């Protein structure tokens, strides 16, 4: 188990949302699109631009700034994670 | 014609809501704005079983929380106009997410029918929904449809009528189990008494909204009875403290819990097949390096086809390069702008002759043939440019490509204080600036929307392309040089778009941080011609109705300026007209960019009506139909042509664009800033290049 911000989770991993810290309106919009604490996100793409996740079967692009405000628990793809987290966190 | 029932269509984005609206109304929609805002309100009528139904398309929203204007409008519509039935459209292939809006709506408004759209896609993916079960649980009719193919629409309307007549459906709004919130909801309902009824909202719904911190609702309650404000706040604070979780999170979670229960109970998946083509496409299009290139290549190649249809470019230059001039000119003549131009030229000629031979005065005949029919020609020649720009926009939007392009360009655009959302209006500007300004409506950040609208006239539209090509051809014999000039101006324009956006952010709005991007990437699908046709037609019509009269009025006024002075009609002697005097007055300024002839200044005046007016004026003044020859007769050297190309490309946007800025931005200040910075930019660029050229000995 590892805690990270969404923008630091490599593509191919799954992550469970723990909390979101942002303005009230933004948090609400995220939650109403299904990105809320407890939900599991599948990170589809995460390199330089927005982070793309699959949530409840739909793809959602989340700007990097916003993604760095989403605290998650990484739950999938452990082997790949160990490679990449030495550099990022 | 008496309307029997009013029906609203609600739904989140990307579920085919507009497709259903168009399917129901046959694409015949009355488009207006919601009061006080530039958000489109589409209305249409249809007849079903001898009943006349008025259909109102509500803004596509993810919820009804009043997070943004669209949500507020949708919600207030339900409360104030009390439609006889609401069709809530959701995506049958992604019920676990799209049902959210449906639940929120049912909690507030019971007279609804749930339409599960994309029935065909759901079937293909092996998704089966127990409609009867879901219907029983939710208490409203549930119908499976395919709006695109028209499947199930008849039975949808049958159920809508049943709800409107009151024979089926709910009496009371849907109750979601809010778990820990329930005691506070009960306390709030007690406290509120008859306030909800007075405001027109269901009492339980109002209590939940207050607990969720909905300020719009709180304001409304306070307006009615401010004495309660304190106790309401106390109760909300108490809930926050005792629950140890924010009430709005708990509320949203509870709704999703209900959705999960519904999906688990009533939806079965026979097979789990994911479209692999979509994944492969996304791998390429969302790649940080290949993505932007691919998106650009795709968009450019589409524009090339549209440009060729409309103006002949760039196919004509290609044939020119290959030495096949006759094919090149045939393509040019048979392009839409070529054909329309000739049509209106001959129409105007015939009307003039007819009027003159029937004894009408010369100025009157010319007013009708040139002033009125000429302006009408300008307006009509605008239609294919605009229409095809909308065709592109519709196709990209419908296919799901637009959302991907916004994502891959986000990183670049952020450096200039914009998000990837600004990419689309910018690109669309190559078709028509009017379309690009109107398309900024889809942007949810207000400042970003205004900045994008103000900067987008920098992108050369198709009308400017026509002038640019004539200038390039007059300056250079070599088609390769001509193409380089044109491409160079395009590149410069996109760079300027970004720089100007940055400056506007810094100095006009004093905010440099780009808004966060948060958008759904809808699944790819082949764009439907029907959807594109509906889209392009209604938008073009909307524009013509809105800006058409402004273009006609200003076009006719310009005709007066060109043909009259204080002594009346000037006849053939255009040198004596108001316009020529104005042109002469402008010569000191245009001389500074090397264009020391009032005829050029006059060209710029006419170019304001529509930029292609520049070449038309030069043809008239030089007395030859071919604009390239005309420019050479007027003594345009390659350096002067370059200076003019820059000035023409960047100076005040055309009339239609100014009209669009006025109607969309609704702030004179922004319109004036836009016109002002464009004039300065055009002048500085043209003067810089001209004098650098003179000093380097190119004069």
Image: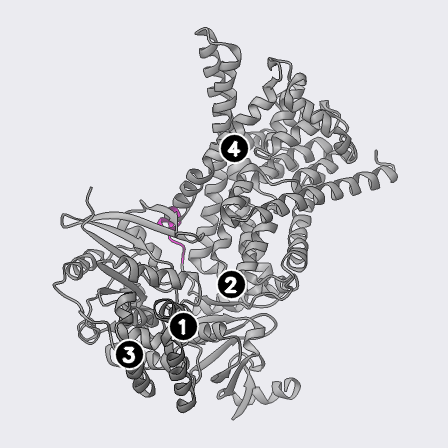
Residue linked to disc 2: B404
Q: Earlier in the sequence, mark 3 or mark 2?
A: 3
Residue B664 image offset from top left, x and y in percent: 50, 48
Q: Which mark is residue B337?
A: 4
Q: Which mark is residue B214?
A: 1
Residue linked to disc 3: B189
Q: CA distance from mark 3 to mark 2?
A: 45 Å
| Chain ID at mark 2 | B
Q: CA distance from mark 1 to mark 2?
A: 32 Å
Magenta span main SS: helix
Q: Residues within 10 Å of mark 4 (few under 14, many from 20)?
A: many
User: Depth check: A4 or B607 in front?
Assistant: B607
Q: Secondary structure at mark 2?
A: helix
Disc 1 versus disc 3: nearer the observer: 3
Disc 4 versus disc 3: nearer the observer: 3
Residue B359 image offset from top left, x and y in percent: 46, 6
Position above or below: B630 against B4: above
Q: Earlier in the sequence, mark 1 or mark 4?
A: 1
Q: Secondary structure at mark 1?
A: loop
Q: Earlier in the sequence, mark 1 or mark 3?
A: 3
| Chain ID at mark 4 | B
Q: CA distance from mark 2 to mark 4?
A: 32 Å
Residues behind callouts 1 and 2 on a single chain? yes
What is the span of residues highlighted in magenta in the rendered image? B526-533
| Chain ID at mark 1 | B
């Amino acid at each position: 188990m590892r805690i990270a911000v969404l923008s630091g989770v490599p593509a191919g991993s799954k992550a469970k949302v723990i909390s979101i810290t942002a303005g009230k309106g933004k948090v609400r919009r995220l939650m109403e699109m299904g990105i809320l604490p407890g939900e599991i996100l599948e990170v589809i793409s995460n390199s330089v631009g927005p982070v793309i996740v699959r949530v409840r079967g739909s793809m959602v692009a989340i700007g990097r700034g916003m993604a760095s405000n989403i605290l998650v628990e990484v739950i999938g793809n452990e082997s790949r994670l160990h490679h990449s987290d030495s550099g990022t966190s | 014609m008496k309307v029997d029932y009013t029906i609203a269509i609600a739904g989140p984005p990307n579920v085919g809501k507009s497709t259903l609206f168009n399917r129901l109304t046959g694409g015949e929609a009355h488009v207006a704005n919601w009061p006080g805002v530039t958000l489109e309100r589409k209305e249409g009528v249809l007849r079903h079983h001898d009943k006349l139904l008025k259909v109102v398309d509500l803004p596509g929203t993810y919820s009804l929380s009043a997070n943004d204007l669209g949500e507020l409008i949708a919600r207030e519509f339900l409360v104030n106009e009390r439609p006889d039935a609401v069709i809530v459209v959701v995506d049958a292939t992604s019920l676990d997410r799209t049902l959210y809006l449906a639940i929120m709506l049912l909690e507030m408004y019971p007279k609804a029918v749930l339409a599960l759209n994309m029935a065909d896609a759901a079937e293909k993916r092996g998704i089966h929904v127990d409609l009867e079960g879901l219907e029983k649980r939710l208490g409203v009719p549930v119908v499976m449809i395919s709006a695109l193919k028209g499947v199930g629409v008849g039975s949808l309307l049958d159920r809508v009528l049943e709800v409107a007549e009151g024979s089926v459906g709910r009496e009371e709004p849907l109750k979601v189990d809010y778990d820990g919130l329930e005691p506070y909801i009960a306390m709030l309902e007690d406290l509120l008494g008859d306030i909800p009824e007075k405001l027109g909202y269901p009492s339980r719904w109002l209590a939940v909204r207050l607990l969720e911190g909905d300020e719009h609702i709180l304001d409304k309650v306070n307006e009615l009875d401010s004495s309660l404000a304190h106790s309401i706040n106390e109760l909300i604070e108490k809930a926050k403290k005792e629950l140890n979780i924010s009430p709005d999170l708990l509320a949203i979670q509870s709704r999703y819990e209900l959705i999960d229960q519904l999906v688990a109970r009533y939806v079965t998946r026979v097979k789990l097949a994911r479209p692999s083509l979509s994944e492969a496409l996304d791998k390429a299009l969302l790649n940080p390096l290949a993505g932007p290139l691919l998106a650009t290549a795709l968009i450019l190649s589409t524009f090339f086809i549209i440009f060729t249809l409309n103006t002949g470019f760039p196919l004509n230059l290609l044939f020119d390069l290959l030495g096949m001039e006759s094919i090149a000119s045939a393509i040019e003549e048979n392009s839409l702008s070529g054909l329309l131009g000739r049509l209106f030229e001959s129409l105007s000629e015939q009307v003039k002759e007819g009027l003159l031979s029937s004894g009408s005065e010369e100025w009157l005949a010319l007013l009708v043939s040139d002033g009125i029919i000429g302006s009408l020609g300008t307006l009509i020649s605008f239609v294919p440019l605009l229409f095809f720009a909308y065709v592109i926009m519709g196709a990209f939007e419908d296919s799901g490509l637009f959302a991907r392009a916004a994502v891959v360009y986000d990183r670049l655009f952020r450096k200039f204080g914009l998000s990837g959302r600004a990419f689309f209006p910018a690109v669309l500007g190559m078709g028509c600036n009017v379309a690009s300004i109107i398309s900024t409506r889809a942007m949810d950040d207000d400042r970003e929307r205004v900045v994008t609208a103000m900067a987008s006239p920098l992108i050369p539209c198709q009308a400017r392309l026509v002038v640019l090509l004539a200038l390039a051809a007059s300056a250079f014999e070599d088609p390769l040089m001509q193409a380089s000039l044109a491409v160079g101006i395009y590149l410069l324009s996109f760079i300027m778009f970004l720089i100007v956006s940055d400056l506007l952010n810094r100095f006009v709005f004093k905010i440099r941080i780009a808004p966060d991007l948060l958008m759904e990437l809808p699944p790819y699908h082949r764009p439907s011609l029907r959807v594109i046709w509906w889209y392009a037609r209604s938008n073009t019509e909307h524009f013509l109705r809105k800006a058409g009269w402004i273009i006609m009025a200003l076009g006719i006024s310009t005709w007066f300026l060109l043909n009259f002075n204080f002594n009346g009609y000037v006849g053939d002697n255009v040198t004596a007209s108001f316009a020529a005097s104005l042109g002469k007055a402008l010569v000191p300024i245009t001389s500074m960019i090397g264009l020391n002839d009032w005829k050029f200044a006059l060209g710029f005046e006419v170019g304001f009506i529509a930029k292609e007016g520049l070449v038309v004026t030069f043809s008239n003044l030089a007395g030859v139909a071919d604009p390239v020859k005309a420019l050479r007769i007027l003594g345009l050297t390659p350096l002067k042509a370059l200076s003019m190309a820059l000035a023409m490309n960047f100076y005040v946007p055309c009339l239609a664009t100014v009209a669009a800025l006025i109607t969309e931005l609704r702030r004179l200040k922004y319109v004036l800033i836009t016109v002002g910075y464009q004039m300065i930019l055009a002048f500085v660029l043209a003067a810089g290049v001209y004098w650098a050229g003179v000093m380097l000995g190119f004069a």
